Amino acid sequence: MMGHGDIDQLITMLARLPGLGPRSARRAALALLRQPESRMLPLAHLMERAATRVKTCSLCGNLDTVDPCHICTDAGRDRGLICVVETVGDLWALERAGVHRGVYQVLGGTLSALAGLGPDDLNVRPLFERIEEGGVREVILALSATVEGATTAHWLQERLLPTGVTVTRVGHGVPMGGALDVLDDGTLAAALTARRSL
């Protein structure tokens, strides 16, 4: 790359991050290197601290500095309402939106024959344990609108139905502000199938 071992290693490591390709990694590295005292060293310190302090919540799978996480221990949360998501990023997105006041279950992925991920690879045991303890009224399946997401939702639904807990799935379809003529056929089909009365 640039002919400088440490700089090349920094760029290579940054390029491994999601959303950063080689160009973005070079720009990020340059921004860090130009201001090491105000950018690079504080970032390195925070990354080291996060690496040693952040842990996975044993109840839901969220990332936090405490276990159980702040969401699971929040007395204002509705523990009878569990939203199942694929990743911590999905959980964070729902939290940013402020639309869910229950608790979560992070699966850590979806069922995928191609990727070799089966039921044992998903973080579902804590979900069933919470249901067995009682008090859970509804499980919301907030999984992606992909073949893997649908397969995982179907698999979970089959296993949850005997528990007597209400199982729902987030709506899929036309996004707010979305024009019908630019949506793909699958999205339009999902929107029409999931229509509701007004």
Image (cartoon, rainbow, N blue to C red):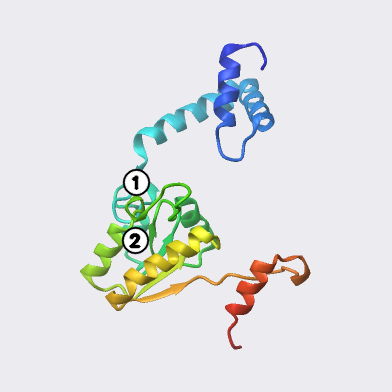
Residue position for label 2:
74
Residue that extends furthest to the front in the rendered view of this protein: 113
Q: Quadrant of the C terminus?
A: bottom right
Residue type pointed to by label 1:
Thr
> Toward the viewer: 197 or 79?
197
Disc 2 versus disc 1: nearer the observer:
1
Residue that extends furthest to the right in the rendered view of this protein: 181
Q: Position of residue 137 (x, y in %)?
A: 33, 76
User: Residue drawn 23% across and 72% down?
Assistant: 134
Q: Residues within 10 Å of mark 1 (few under 14, many from 20)?
A: some
Q: Residues within 10 Å of mark 2 (few under 14, many from 20)?
A: few
Side of 71 relative to 188 (left or right): left
Question: Is there any visible trace of residue 175 in the rendered image?
Answer: no
User: Residue drawn 44% across and 66% down?
Assistant: 153
Q: Position of residue 170 (x, y in %)?
A: 51, 70
Establish if 193 lies above or below 75: below
Question: Is there any visible trace of residue 67 in the rendered image?
Answer: yes
User: Where is residue 60, by image quadrant?
Assistant: bottom left
Residue type pointed to by label 2:
Asp
Which mark, by number, is residue 56? Answer: 1
Q: Position of residue 139 (x, y in %)?
A: 38, 70
Establish if 102 lies above or below 8: below
**Secondary element type, mark 1:** strand
Q: Are marks 2 and 1 in contact (CB under 8 Å)?
A: no
How many numbered circles are shown?
A: 2
